[in-house]
Structures are given as structure tokens and as C-alpha cells.
Image: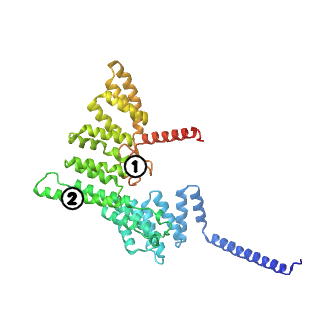
């Protein structure tokens, strides 16, 4: 069969033309790049070189020289302002960003960026009122791109939290949480992955409730009693709103149970604290001592201790163990406390548990053995005290007490209710079970 090859020369010509066009375009791009690079002042490249070598002082000097000779280099001035702020020279950053925001002929997007950066500068310098004014104006006008509008609301939320302006913080968080994909530049497919703010809103309501309770008059009178009752009702309403925003808000039930106990409503307090079991049982340890106190107030300490032991069996935690140990030691003596901790150590071996075990042993030991046991306990305690801390999952900050908001990074509910010693025990148990699982013979 003959094949007509008449089209081959035309295909070759077409390929040559296509290649030539590509070469010509590349030459034009290269020529344009060379022209632009020659137009850039030498100080710009010096600044980049200093910046790459982490010589920020010299880089700043070079960039300042560029901005003097090329005042239209807006992006470079943004970079310069960021460098100033990173170095702690907030006053100079404010000067750069303020001048940019007031410049004529700037695009809406660039001016919005300058105002946002200026607001960040003011916040870093502690002038939160200045930052709030800029951000609230931007949020009210809804200027800039969708991502800039979302950034404005997030920064405004941070400012409100810093100022402890909880009502406005709730409004800003709710607007962020209710934002549609079109408003924040996200697709409908990624909407489910967008950050939600229910947890923060719940904590803001808890803060409002706590403020109301702390502002109650110290000396009761007829008028103050009526006012206190009104405040209590309003505070409880805030807790209801917290649970409506986040049904898993453990803090709301912890606070409500504490208030009920102070009002001698101990049965209600016990019922409220037990709701935590359905929310997150890991937090039960935070209510252990108060739960036992309410049982005692009802002359039912034995049932309270049995309740805690049952919780410890299902949801082991060091805070629960400590409460049970102290209660057992007070009611049944050191031998019973020793047996309790010994049994717990078999299932949950920790240095903190061993420390408690030695404490019970010292109390029950004869005088000639107490000195040696005390030395051993002090050695164990010095190590266990470094492990019995709460850890922020977001920034790694360690604290002896539990915080709902991390003092270091400001994250809400980033502290685990379990101490670091408990994490190590859980990891060891997990590793051991995985190893034992591999060793199990395969079933036929």
C-alpha cells in the first residue's frame, strides 16, 4: 500500500515556524528581563544579598536608599516595614505604613494592605485603641479583597480578646464563623475544612459570666441581694449561650457546678459535673476535689469516694488519683491508700503515682525505715514534679496549673487536661500493645 508523503514538507515547515516563534518570544522575554534588571538600582541587589546573608541592618540601609531614589517601589516599602517590625522597631514600621496608606494614587488593595499592616504595628506597640479603629473602619466598609476582609476580621478579633471586649469578640468571631465561601475566597468544597470559631465563642461567653460573678458586691444588703440574684441569672444565661455555641464546652459545666456548690445546691452541682463525662471525660480530673467536697457536704463522702474510684477505673487521670489518694488516706489510713495506689500503678505506671505510693509507705513504715524511704521519695519527687505539668498542644508552653487560654500563644483550650506524665504512660502502653499485637500468632 502506497503512503502519500506530500504533507511531510508542510509539517516540517510548520514545526520550524513554531520553533522560531517560541525562540523569538523567549528572546523578547529575556530582553525585557535584562532591561528591567538594569533599571533596578544597585542598592536593591545589595539589599537582597545582605538579606540572604541574614545581615538585616545592612539590608535595611540598602532598601532605604532604594526607596529614596524610587518612591514608587511600593512592595519594597512593605518589605521594609515588615523588617522594621520584626526587629522590634515598631515606630519606624508605623512611619513606613502610615506614609503608604496616605499616598495618592495607590490602589484600593495596596492601601488596604498598608492599613492592615499599620493596625498590626499599633497592636504590637500596645496601642490597641488605634489598631481597633483602623480595623473596625475597614470591616465596616468591607474594602479590599475577600482574603483581606477575612484577615481584617481575624485581626479585629485578636484586638478584642486582648482588650477583653468579649461582646465585640463574639460578634467578630460569629461573622468569621458565618462567612460564606464567596466572602472569604473559599470554594464550597473547602468550606468544611475552614476554621470554625464555636469553641472561642463559647469561651467568650464563659468570660462574660465570670466577670459578672466577680463583680458582685462583697457586703450583702437588701438591694445588693436583688442585684446579685439578677447577676447570677444573667451569668447562667451566658453559660447557656456558651453551651449553645459549643455543646462540648466543659468549662461552662465546671463553672456552673462550682456556683451551684457555693449556693449549697450540692446535688445539682454533682449532676452538672457528671455531664462532663458525656462531653470529654479527660476533664473530670479538674472537678475531682470539688465533686468530693459536694458529696461530703451531703454527708455522703463514702459514695463520693466510690464515685471517684469508678471514674478513675474508666478514665484514669493523675488529678483523679490525687483526689482519691488524699480522701482514702484521710478516711481509711495509709495502708488503704498504699493498696489503692499500688493497684493503680499496675495499670497506669507513672512517677507521680510512685511518689504517692512512697508517701503512703512512709506514713505506715516503722521509724528505722522512714529515713531511707524519705530519701527515695525526694529523689522520685524531684523527677515527677517536672512531669506533672500541663502542656499547650499549640506552642509547647508548660504550666503547673491548667489554663483555658494559653498565656504564651493565646490559643483557647489548647492545654490538655492530662499532664505530660500521663501522655508518656499512654504512649508506652500504645507501643507495648502494638508490639504484643505483632507477636500474636496468626489465626487459621
Question: How far across and down, in percent of the image, does residue 19 sit?
Answer: 76, 75
The residue depicted at 34 percent of the width and 18 percent of the height is: 368
How many other residues sit within 10 Å of disc 1, few (<14), some (14-19) or many (≥20)? many
183 above or below 61?
below
Query: Circle 2 sits in a helix, a strand or a loop, which is it?
Result: helix
Along the line of sight, the residue nearer the viewer: 200 or 433: 433
Q: Residue furthest front?
A: 444
Residue at position x 54%, y 58% from top? 58
Q: Is residue 343 above or below residue 240?
A: above
Residue at image mark 2:
233
What residue lies at 14% left-to-right and 58% top-to-bottom?
226
Q: Is residue 51 left or right of residue 196?
A: right
Depth check: give the residue in front, 83 or 422.
422
Viewer-nearest of discs 2 and 1: 2
The numbered disc on residue 47 is none
> Of the residues under marks 2 and 1, which one precedes in the sequence?
2
Residue 240 in view = yes
Q: Which residue is mark 1?
A: 415
Q: Is residue 21 left or right of residue 188?
A: right
**Horizontal side of residue 223 vs 296, given as left or right:** left
Q: Position of residue 76 (x, y in %)?
A: 53, 67
Is 119 on the left-hand or right-hand side of 295? right
Picture coordinates of residue 39, whole percent (x, y) = 62, 72
Relative to 166, residue 218 above or below: above
Amino acid at each position: 500500500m502506497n503512503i502519500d508523503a506530500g504533507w511531510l514538507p508542510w509539517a516540517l515547515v510548520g514545526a520550524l515556524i513554531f520553533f522560531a516563534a517560541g525562540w523569538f518570544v523567549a528572546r523578547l522575554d529575556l530582553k525585557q528581563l535584562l532591561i528591567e534588571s538594569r533599571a533596578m538600582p544597585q542598592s536593591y541587589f545589595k539589599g537582597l544579598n545582605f538579606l540572604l546573608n541574614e545581615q538585616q541592618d545592612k539590608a535595611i540601609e540598602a532598601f532605604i536608599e532604594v526607596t529614596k531614589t524610587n518612591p514608587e517601589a511600593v512592595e519594597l516599602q512593605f518589605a521594609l516595614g515588615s523588617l522594621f517590625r520584626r526587629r522590634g522597631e515598631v515606630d519606624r514600621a508605623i512611619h513606613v505604613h502610615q506614609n503608604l496608606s496616605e499616598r495618592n494614587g495607590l490602589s484600593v488593595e495596596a492601601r488596604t494592605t498598608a492599613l492592615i499592616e499599620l493596625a498590626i504595628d499599633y497592636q504590637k506597640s500596645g496601642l490597641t485603641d488605634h489598631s481597633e479603629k483602623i480595623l473596625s473602619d475597614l470591616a465596616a466598609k468591607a474594602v479590599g479583597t475577600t482574603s483581606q476582609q477575612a484577615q481584617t476580621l481575624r485581626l479585629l478579633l485578636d484586638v478584642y480578646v486582648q482588650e477583653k471586649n468579649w461582646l465585640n469578640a463574639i460578634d467578630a468571631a460569629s461573622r468569621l464563623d458565618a462567612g460564606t465561601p464567596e466572602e472569604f475566597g473559599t470554594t464550597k468544597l473547602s468550606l468544611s475544612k475552614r476554621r470554625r470559631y464555636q469553641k472561642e465563642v463559647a469561651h467568650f461567653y464563659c468570660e462574660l459570666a465570670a466577670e459578672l460573678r466577680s463583680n458582685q458586691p462583697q457586703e450583702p444588703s437588701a438591694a445588693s441581694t436583688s442585684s446579685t440574684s439578677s447577676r447570677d441569672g444573667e451569668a447562667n444565661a451566658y453559660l447557656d449561650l456558651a453551651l449553645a455555641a459549643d455543646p462540648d464546652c466543659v468549662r461552662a459545666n465546671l463553672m456552673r457546678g462550682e456556683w451551684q456548690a457555693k449556693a449549697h445546691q450540692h446535688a445539682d452541682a454533682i449532676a452538672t459535673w457528671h455531664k462532663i463525662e458525656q462531653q470529654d471525660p479527660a476533664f473530670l480530673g479538674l472537678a475531682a476535689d470539688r465533686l468530693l467536697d459536694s458529696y461530703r457536704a451531703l454527708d455522703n463522702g463514702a459514695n463520693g469516694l466510690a464515685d471517684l474510684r469508678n471514674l478513675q477505673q474508666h478514665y484514669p487521670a493523675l488529678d483523679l488519683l490525687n483526689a482519691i489518694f488524699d480522701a482514702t488516706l484521710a478516711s481509711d489510713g495509709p495502708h488503704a491508700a498504699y493498696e489503692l495506689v499500688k493497684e493503680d500503678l499496675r495499670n497506669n505506671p507513672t512517677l507521680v503515682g510512685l511518689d504517692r505510693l512512697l508517701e503512703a509507705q512512709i506514713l505506715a513504715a516503722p521509724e528505722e525505715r522512714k529515713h531511707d524511704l524519705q530519701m527515695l521519695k525526694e529523689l522520685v519527687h524531684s523527677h515527677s514534679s517536672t512531669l506533672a505539668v500541663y502542656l499547650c498542644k499549640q506552642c509547647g508552653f508548660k504550666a503547673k496549673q491548667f489554663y483555658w487560654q494559653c498565656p504564651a500563644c493565646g490559643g483557647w483550650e489548647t492545654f490538655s487536661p492530662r499532664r505530660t506524665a500521663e501522655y508518656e504512660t499512654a504512649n508506652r502502653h500504645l507501643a507495648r500493645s502494638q508490639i504484643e499485637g505483632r507477636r500474636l500468632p496468626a489465626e487459621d
